[in-house]
Amino acid sequence: MTQINLPFQIGQIVEVKSFIRGYRGAWFRCKILDISNEKGELRYKFKYLDFPDEPLDNALVFETPKGGTESQLMLRPKYPPLYLESEYLNLQSDNVEPLVVVHDSWKVGDLVDWLRDDIYWSGEIVEMRGRRACQIELLPKPEGEGDSYQGLCKNLRPRLDWSVEDGWKVPCTADGKKCAKIVTSKKEDGGIGDECETAKEQTKKTTKQVEGNEGLRLNIMESDGIEAAVLDIEELIVRIDWFKGILKPDVGEGAKCSWKYEDYRPSSSGI
C-alpha cells in the first residue's frame, strides 16, 4: 500500500486504530508528536489524549492484523461533528467541514462505534433492548475482538470509513442500508437515504469525475521510488479496463455488434 500523500501533520488530533490483542478494532483519540521513516516504514509518534499516563506510541501507519491478509491505514482525522437528524434540521449556519447526520433512532443491523472506557469499539447492533439500550457485536477476529456486549444507545455513533481519496464514507450494511449520511453543505443536502448507491449511480458519478479531471495525477510526481511507478502502472491498467467497458456498446441480447475494440499498437515502419 502506498505511503505517500497522507494529509497528517505534527500537532494534529487524529484517531488511531489498534490491532493489539484485547483492543483490536478500537479507535483512540491521539495527537501526532512526530513523523519518521524508519527503514522504509512510515511511523507516527502518538500521545494518547484520554490516557495521559500511557507511554508514547511510535506506531506504523500501515499494519496488517495478525492472521489477516490486507494492510490497513491505522489513523484518520478526528471524527466529524455528529448530529441527530432532528438537531440537524434546526441547524442555522451552512457548514463547510463534513458533518455526520444520523437517524433519531437506532435499529438492528446499524454499523456503529460504541464508546466504552474512553475508547470507541467498532461493531454492529444485533438486538435492541428498549429505546435506550442494545446488544452490540464487535468486529470479528482478526480485525476486532468478536465479543458481544450490552451498551447504551447514547454511547453510539455511526461507524465511518475514511480514505485519502474519498474522505469520510458511511459503510453499507449486508442488506445495502446505512444509518447516517455525510453532509458538507445544507444547500446540497438531499436528506438521509437508507439505500446505498446502485452500480448504475456509481458509474455515473465515476464518469463525471473522469470528465472533470484536468489531468492525470501520478504517484511518481510525489516520489521517485519503484513502488510509486508500479502503483501508477496498476492504476493505468484499471483505467484502461474501465474505458473498455464504457466503449463496449450495449446492443442487447441476441444482437450482433458491427465493431469491436482493439488495442492500438504503433506501426513498426517508423511513420
Image (cartoon, rainbow, N blue to C red):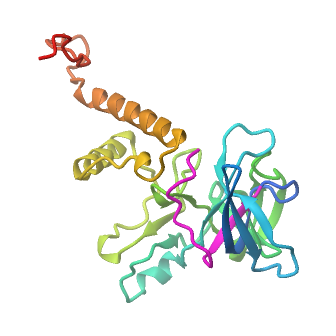
Is the N terminus in the top left, top right, bottom left or bottom right quadrant? top right
Q: What x and y, as percent, mark residue 156?
A: 68, 70
| 268 inside magenta stretch | no
Residue 45: quadrant of the picture: bottom right
User: Given the current orientation, which residue lies at the most extreme bottom position?
Assistant: 92
Residue 230: horizontal and vertical position, in percent? 49, 35
Indicate the quadrant containing the C terminus: top left, top right, bottom left or bottom right.
Answer: top left
Asked whether, in this view, residue 240 is left or right of residue 143, the answer is left
**Is residue 205 something one can see in this rendering?**
yes
Magenta segment, prevailing SS (helix, strand or loop): loop
Q: Which residues are magenta?
A: 1-18
Foreground residue among 17 and 91: 17
In the image: residue 184, left or right of residue 20:
left
Q: Position of residue 49 (x, y in %)?
A: 75, 80
Q: Residue 106 vs residue 144: left or right? A: left
For residue 268, above or below residue 67: above
- Rendered residue at 26%/15% (across/down): 253
